[in-house]
Image (cartoon, rainbow, N blue to C red):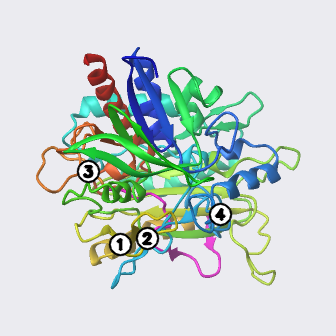
C-alpha cells in the first residue's frame, strides 16, 4: 500500500462484495482494496459461474472444492446434487450445510452456503426478478430504488431474452397465460443474468461479471488484492470504531492482523452476523428477523402433444432458459412462481412409475411464499460450542407459522391450476420443501431508517454506532418477499458502495 493510501477490507467475494470492490476502485484514486475469501479459487476468470465450465468432470470438481472439506478449508460436508430442479431450488452440489437448529426449534435443516471465490455467485441459477409492492424497501424512494435496480441489472448482465431457441418455453408461456391473465396475473419469461451467445447458448453470469476487469487479472494488483483460503476470525474494534480484521490462513493456521479505514462484511446472511458476534458487535437486532421463501414444489409430467418435442438434432437447452414466471401481485397472486421445462425428469423416478420416461417431458414448478419477519426467527451463537473454524456455533430458531401455512395452502391452488394446464403431477407431488431449501436467507442484519433496535444498519448499510463497518448481502433485506433476492441485494450494495467511495474521497 502506498503512503497516504486509504484501505478497504472486504470480507467475502460473492456478488455483493464484488460490487464494493469494483465501484470503490472505479470511483476513487487513492484507495486500495483487500478482498478476503475463506474458500479456494475455482475458475479463471475469478468467480465465474461453474455452469460455464464445459467439461462435466471439471465442473463437478469445481463444485466439490467449494464444499469443504471440514479439515483444511472452511466448511463441512457438501450436499449431493438434489432431487429437485435447478432454478426452482438452487442446486445443492457446491454448497455445504451451515449451523443447526436451536433448542426447541425445527431450525432450517436445509440451510447451506458455498465457500469459494465468487461465493454463491459461482453456483446460482441467475434468476433476477424485481421486487414488487410490499417486497420493496419503503424507506428508499421509488425512483432511487428503480435506478439502483437498473444498475444492478447492468452489473449482473440481466437479460429478458433468454427464451431464444426454446420453443417449449413459448408454448408454456401461452398455456399458463391463458390460465391466469383473465385475473390480471402477469405471466412472463423470467429475467435471468447471462449473455446470450451467437450459437444459441448462454454464458451465465457469475461474480466475474460484477468484478469486471478485476476478475481477469491476477489476484494481486497495485490497488486490489484477493486473498483466497483466508478466514476472517475477528474484526478489530477500538472503542466503537472498526479498524481492521484478524485473518487466518486456513492452509497453515497462521493468523495476522490487517488494518483498514473501512471494513465491508459481505459473508452471507448466516456468517455475517456470526462474525459480528465473534467480534463483540452485538446490536439488539443482530441475527433476528430471519426470513426465506417457504416453497411448495412439484414436477408435472406434460401431456402428449401439448409442447413442441425437443429437436433430436439440436443441442440440449439449459432448463434455466425455459423458465416461465408468474409475478407477485399483492392482491391477486402474493407469491413468486417459476416453471422450468426439462425433457428428462429432474428427480429420480422408479422404472415402474407411470410417469417414467414421459415422452413429452416434465415441468418443475415452485411457488415461493412470503415469510413475515419476526424477531424470534433468528440466528444465535454458541460461544461454548464453536464450529469447525473455532467461531461461535451457529444456532437457528425458525418456525413456519399459521400465516405462512395459509399462504402455502393458497399457493397450492394456483400451482394446481398450472399443473392441470400442462399435465399431471408425478407420484408424491407436490411437496413443501424443508425450511432452508431456498438458500435465500434474509433479514439477519437488516437495514432500517432509524436506530430503533429493529435494524443493524442504516439505509446506506453502515452499522449503527460502529464507524468503519459496512454490511452487504441478502441479510440486509428487511421485507417479507417471495422473489429471488440477489437483484435487490446487489442494488443495495450499489447504494452502499457509492456512499463509501464518496466518504473515502472526501477524506
Q: Residue at x 34, y 73 (%)?
A: 398
Q: Position of residue 147 (x, y in %)?
A: 33, 28
Classify mark 3: helix, strand or loop: helix
Task: Give the residue at mark 4.
Answer: 69
Q: CA distance from mark 1 to mark 4?
A: 22 Å
Q: Tell me which numbered mark, 1 or 3, is placed earlier along the sequence.
A: 3
Number of dots carrying numbers: 4
- Packing grade of label 1 (10 A; few <14, some 14-19, many >=20) is some
Classify mark 4: helix, strand or loop: loop
Is residue 141 visible in this depiction of the protein? yes
**Residues marked 1 and 4 touching at CB (< 8 Å):** no
Q: Position of residue 450 (x, y in %)?
A: 12, 45
Q: CA distance from mark 1 to mark 3?
A: 34 Å
Q: CA distance from mark 2 to mark 4?
A: 17 Å
Q: Tell me which numbered mark, 1 or 4, is placed earlier along the sequence.
A: 4
Classify mark 1: helix, strand or loop: strand
In the displayed structure, would residue 114 be above or below residue 197?
below
**Residues marked 2 and 1 touching at CB (< 8 Å):** yes
In the displayed structure, would residue 51 be above or below residue 105?
above
- Packing grade of label 3 (10 A; few <14, some 14-19, many >=20) is some
Task: Give the residue at mark 3.
Answer: 134
Range covered by the magenta-colored residues: 421-443
- Kindly report which numbered mark, 3 or 4, lies closer to the viewer in this rendering: 4
Specify the label residue 382 is tagged with: 1
Is residue 166 visible in this depiction of the protein? no
Left or right of residue 126: residue 204: right
Q: Position of residue 403 (x, y in %)?
A: 27, 73
Q: Residue at x 52, y 26 (%)?
A: 224
Specify the label residue 386 is tagged with: 2
- Kindly report which numbered mark, 2 or 3, lies closer to the viewer in this rendering: 2
Residue 81 or residue 337, whichever sits in front = 81
Q: Quadrant of residue 440?
A: bottom left
Amino acid at each position: 500500500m502506498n503512503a497516504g493510501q486509504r484501505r478497504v477490507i472486504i470480507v467475502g467475494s460473492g456478488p455483493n462484495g464484488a460490487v464494493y470492490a469494483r465501484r470503490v476502485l472505479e470511483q476513487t484514486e487513492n484507495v486500495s482494496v483487500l478482498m478476503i475469501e475463506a474458500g479456494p479459487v475455482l475458475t479463471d476468470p475469478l468467480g465465474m459461474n461453474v455452469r460455464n465450465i464445459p467439461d462435466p468432470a471439471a465442473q463437478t470438481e469445481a463444485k466439490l472444492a467449494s464444499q469443504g472439506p471440514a479439515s483444511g478449508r472452511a466448511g463441512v460436508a457438501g450436499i449431493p446434487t438434489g432431487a429437485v430442479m435447478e432454478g426452482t431450488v438452487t442446486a445443492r452440489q457446491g454448497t455445504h450445510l451451515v449451523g443447526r437448529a436451536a433448542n426447541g426449534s425445527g431450525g432450517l435443516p436445509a440451510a447451506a452456503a458455498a465457500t469459494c471465490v465468487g461465493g454463491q455467485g459461482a453456483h446460482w441459477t441467475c434468476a433476477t426478478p424485481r421486487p414488487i409492492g410490499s417486497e420493496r424497501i419503503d424507506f428508499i424512494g421509488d425512483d432511487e430504488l428503480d435506478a439502483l435496480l437498473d444498475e444492478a441489472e447492468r452489473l449482473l448482465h440481466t437479460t429478458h431474452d433468454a427464451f431464444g431457441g426454446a420453443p417449449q418455453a413459448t408454448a408454456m408461456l401461452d398455456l399458463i397465460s391463458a390460465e391466469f391473465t383473465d385475473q390480471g396475473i402477469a405471466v412472463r419469461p423470467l429475467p435471468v443474468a447471462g449473455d446470450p451467445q451467437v450459437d444459441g447458448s448462454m454464458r451465465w453470469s457469475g461474480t466475474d461479471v460484477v468484478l469486471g476487469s478485476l476478475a481477469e487479472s491476477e489476484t494481486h494488483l497495485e490497488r486490489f488484492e484477493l486473498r483466497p483460503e483466508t478466514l476472517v476470525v475477528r474484526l478489530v474494534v477500538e472503542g466503537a470504531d472498526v479498524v481492521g480484521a484478524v485473518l487466518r490462513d486456513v492452509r497453515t493456521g497462521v493468523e495476522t492482523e490487517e488494518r483498514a479505514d473501512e471494513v465491508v462484511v459481505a459473508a452471507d446472511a448466516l456468517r455475517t452476523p456470526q462474525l459480528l458476534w465473534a467480534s463483540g458487535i452485538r446490536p439488539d437486532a443482530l441475527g433476528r428477523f430471519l426470513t426465506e421463501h417457504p416453497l411448495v414444489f412439484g414436477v408435472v409430467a406434460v401431456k402428449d402433444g401439448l409442447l413442441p418435442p425437443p429437436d433430436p438434432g439440436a443441442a440440449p437447452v439449459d432448463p434455466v432458459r425455459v423458465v416461465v414466471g408468474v409475478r407477485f401481485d399483492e392482491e391477486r397472486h402474493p407469491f413468486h412462481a417459476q416453471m422450468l421445462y426439462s425433457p428428462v425428469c429432474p428427480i429420480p423416478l422408479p422404472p415402474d412409475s407411470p410417469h417414467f420416461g414421459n415422452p413429452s417431458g416434465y415441468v418443475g414448478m415452485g411457488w415461493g411464499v412470503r415469510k413475515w419477519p419476526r424477531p424470534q426467527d433468528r440466528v444465535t451463537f454458541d460461544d461454548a460450542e464453536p464450529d469447525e473454524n473455532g467461531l461461535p456455533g451457529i444456532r437457528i430458531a425458525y418456525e413456519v407459522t399459521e400465516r405462512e401455512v395459509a399462504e402455502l395452502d393458497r399457493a397450492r391452488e394456483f400451482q394446481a391450476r398450472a399443473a392441470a394446464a400442462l399435465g399431471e403431477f408425478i407420484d408424491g407431488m407436490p411437496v413443501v420443501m424443508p425450511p432452508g431449501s431456498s438458500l435465500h436467507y434474509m433479514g439477519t442484519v437488516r437495514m432500517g431508517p432509524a436506530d430503533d433496535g429493529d435494524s443493524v444498519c442504516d439505509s446506506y448499510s453502515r452499522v449503527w454506532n460502529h464507524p468503519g463497518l459496512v454490511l452487504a448481502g441478502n441479510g440486509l433485506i428487511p421485507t417479507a418477499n417471495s422473489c429471488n433476492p440477489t437483484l435487490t441485494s446487489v442494488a443495495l450494495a450499489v447504494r452502499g458502495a457509492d456512499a463509501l467511495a464518496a466518504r473515502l474521497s472526501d477524506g
